[in-house]
Image: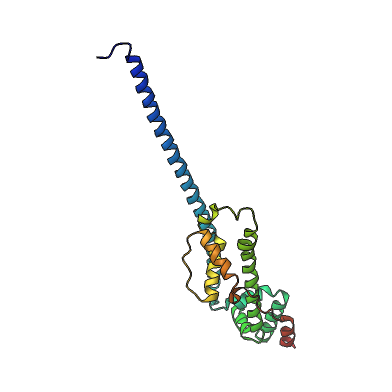
Amino acid sequence: MESESEIPARLLASATHLADVIDGKIRALNIKADELEDQIRKAEARAHRRAAHNLRDAKCYRLGSSFEPVNALDFDPTALAGWLASGSAGVLALVQIALSNPAGGIPDLFARLFRSQVGDDLRKLGVHARWIHRSKIYRKEVIEFKASPAFPKQGWRSKPPTSNQVYLIEEIALALQIEKPALRTRGEAFVFIEEAGGNPAFWSEPEMPNLAAALAEFVS
């Protein structure tokens, strides 16, 4: 039987042990809380990226839905992009078509314009405009990022692909006529985009048409 003089020491030892156990539990809870907060931050970041990509898709859908009521869903999207990039020259070409077909509605006039001798040049201009757009995104996502202080850090590689990367991957798959790869991380997406960036089928600058000459011949 322990003496009364030993009881305080035993109580102190038990209290110290209990404090150590509680402290360990608290540290474990803090670690789990930090991990949970990190998962929440990552989930929020993924949600923001999905929202940005979905917003772009929603805008494209809303714009396309305005074509359906006027029977314009069959528009050549590349030629239309070229016309939108052509400035006043494209307006003049459309006016010329309208003068020859005064009873035609706007969708019919565009269809006639795209079938005319200027249509091929508008398509070439559309191809060039899309190339300019993609090359700007590529430069930002690959060339400029690779030269930035953030590139040597490894943390970004495990994050989900950015909305710009998703767009470029889709465009590359279409241009090279391959199945869209399932890339789950930003690092995988970066490597794929960088390697595809050297493929002439996707990144060689396309021919810039002489729309002014074609238009002069068209209206003469």
Rendering coords of residue 184 (x, y %): 47, 60
Examine the image and state in which quarter residue 194 appears: bottom right
Rendering coords of residue 52 (x, y %): 54, 58
202 w.r.t. 137: above or below: below
Residue at 71% x, 87% y is 218
214 or 155, nearer to the observer: 155
> Split into 4 quadrants, where in the image is the C terminus?
bottom right
Residue 58 visible here: no
70 w.r.t. 216: above or below: above
Q: Is residue 167 left or right of residue 217?
A: left
Residue at 59% x, 78% y is 107
> Split into 4 quadrants, where in the image is the N terminus?
top left
Rendering coords of residue 20 (x, y %): 40, 28
Examine the image and state in which quarter residue 16 appears: top left
Q: Is residue 58 left or right of residue 19?
A: right
Residue at 62% x, 64% y is 137
Q: Is residue 93 left or right of residue 162?
A: right
Farthest left residue in view: 1
